[in-house]
Image: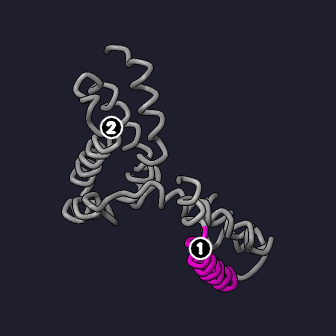
């Protein structure tokens, strides 16, 4: 295996977040998306000599990732939840807007910080730590129904906050760009 040039490895490193976000938009499972990201990175390193420096690197990398996702889906068709390759093609064909994803992530983080402390704790357990409703219920000593209701209210609050603030953050990002 040949060594990868420093400039090329910097290009691969620079797109990791957006490449992962793209893969995650095509697969419902984080662990599988991480595996596909690693496979894609390996292929990108192996295909360094095939990359045209005058081409769009991120687009080229995304096409390799899309192929890896489709290969993964075809291989795991018996899974409980699996998108058809046609759906993946349709989603992947849509333009992936990295700036918009960054804006949404920034706003979501801001909105998360605005949640009351108890809601933030429950949200962290559910969405970051990926705990079940039963586990959260036991940890905070509240009924599972109450946890489900709280998670519903958290989603509503986050959705409304993101909807309200996204326009402002996108305008701010556009202002900084010009």
For this view, does 101 lie left or right of residue 155? left
Q: Is residue 61 above or below residue 126?
A: above
Residue 57 image offset from top left, x and y in percent: 33, 37
The boundaries of the magenta stretch are 144-168
Tell me the quarter of the picture where residue 55 sits: top left
Mark 2, secondary structure of its residue: helix
Residue marked by disc 2: 57
Q: Residue at x 65, y 85 (%)?
A: 149
Residue 170 image offset from top left, x and y in percent: 54, 65
Q: CA distance from mark 1 to mark 2?
A: 31 Å
For this view, does 74 lie left or right of residue 172? left
Residue marked by disc 1: 162
Q: Do we see residue 95 in this rendering?
A: yes
Q: Residue at x 62, y 73 (%)?
A: 165
Residue 159 image offset from top left, x and y in percent: 57, 78
Residue 89 image offset from top left, x and y in percent: 22, 59
Q: Residue at x 43, y 26 (%)?
A: 9
Tell me the quarter of the picture where residue 121 sits: bottom right
Q: Quadrant of the N terminus?
A: top left
User: Is 165 within the magenta?
Assistant: yes
């Amino acid at each position: 295996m040949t060594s990868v040039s420093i400039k090329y490895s910097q290009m691969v490193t620079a797109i990791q977040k957006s490449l992962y976000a793209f893969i995650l938009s095509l697969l419902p499972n984080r662990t599988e998306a991480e595996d596909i990201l690693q496979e894609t990175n390996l292929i990108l390193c192996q295909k360094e000599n095939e990359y045209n420096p005058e081409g769009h690197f991120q687009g080229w990398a995304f096409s390799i990732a899309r192929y890896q996702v489709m290969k993964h889906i075809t291989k795991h068709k018996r899974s409980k939840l699996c998108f058809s390759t046609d759906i993946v093609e349709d989603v992947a064909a849509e333009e992936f807007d990295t700036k918009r994803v960054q804006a949404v992530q920034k706003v979501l983080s801001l909105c998360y910080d605005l949640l009351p402390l108890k809601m933030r704790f429950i949200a962290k357990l559910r969405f970051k730590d990926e705990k079940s409703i039963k586990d959260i219920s036991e940890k905070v000593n509240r009924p599972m129904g109450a946890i489900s209701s709280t998670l519903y209210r958290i989603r509503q609050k986050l959705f409304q906050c993101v909807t309200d603030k996204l326009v402002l953050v996108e305008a701010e990002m556009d202002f900084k760009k010009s």
